[in-house]
Image (cartoon, rainbow, N blue to C red):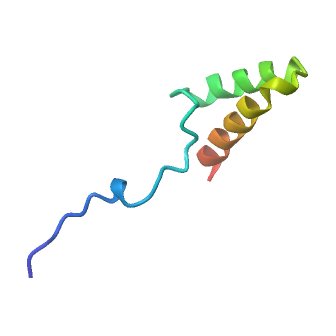
Amino acid sequence: MRDIQVDRSQLAPSILPGDVLELSDDECLACLARAVETHDSARLDEVAALIGRLAVTIE
């Protein structure tokens, strides 16, 4: 039987937030700390994306 290679990256979207740049875990945590310190409700989307990015790392 022949092996068939399938490109699975086309089958499902990434669970990583698309608007969070490629950051190291430490950089992401530092950005999250700065965003939370400001108490600015306009940054809630950024905070959620950073938390989501870290949650993917933890899994």
- Image coordinates for residue 18, horizontal then vertical, percent: 54, 37
Q: Quadrant of residue 16?
A: top right
- Image coordinates for residue 52, horizontal then vertical, percent: 67, 43
Of all residues, the one furthest to the front in this rendering is 42
Quadrant in the picture for the N terminus: bottom left
- Image coordinates for residue 47, horizontal then vertical, percent: 75, 32
Q: Left or right: 48 with respect to 58?
A: right
Instruction: Look at 13% across and 72% down and name the residue there.
Output: 3
Instruction: Look at 79% across and 22% down and name the residue there.
Output: 35
- Image coordinates for residue 7, horizontal then vertical, percent: 27, 57
Instruction: Examine the rendered structure and indicate whether residue 11 appears above or below residue 21.
Output: below
Q: Nearer the viewer, residue 40 or 55?
A: 40
Of all residues, the one furthest to the bottom in this rendering is 1
Q: Left or right: 18 with respect to 46?
A: left
Instruction: Look at 91% across and 22% down and name the residue there.
Output: 39
Instruction: Look at 87% across and 17% down and name the residue there.
Output: 38
